[in-house]
Image (tube, grey):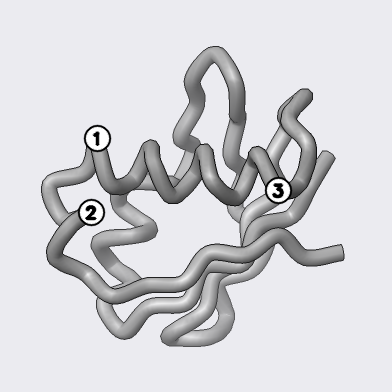
Amino acid sequence: MSKIEINAAQMKFIRDFFDNYEDDKVKFKLADASNRIKTIYEVETELADNELEKYVKAVFKEKSQYGNALYYTIRVIK
């Protein structure tokens, strides 16, 4: 299990997309949303950390209507 930290000013749109998101490579579970601009998810996956980060960015960019419009950062944390 990996942890992903996502930072964004418009966190509502990030949360709307990733809360309980699941596909054939990843399964998201909300771990911490106590901060207004930072959310942490636990992610079940077989992907390596560097692949996971790239994959999550690509998924949001391609599948979310806000993926190209929002400024956000995604990183794998330990």
Q: Which mark is residue 63?
A: 1
Between discs 1 and 3, the one toward the N terminus: 3
In this rendering, is residue 6 above or below 3?
Answer: below
Residue 62 is left or right of residue 59, and the answer is left
In the rendered image, the quadrant that contains the C terminus is bottom right
Between discs 2 and 3, the one toward the N terminus: 3
In this rendering, is residue 12 above or below 1?
Answer: below
Residue highlighted by disc 3: 50
Point out the frontmost of discs 2 and 3: 3
Q: Residue at x 49, y 37 (%)?
A: 20
Residue type highlighted by circle 3 = Asn
Q: Nearer the viewer, residue 7 or 50?
A: 50
Residue highlighted by disc 2: 67
Residue 44 is left or right of residue 15, and the answer is right
- Contact? badges 2 and 1 (CB < 8 Å): yes
Point out the frontmost of discs 1 and 3: 3
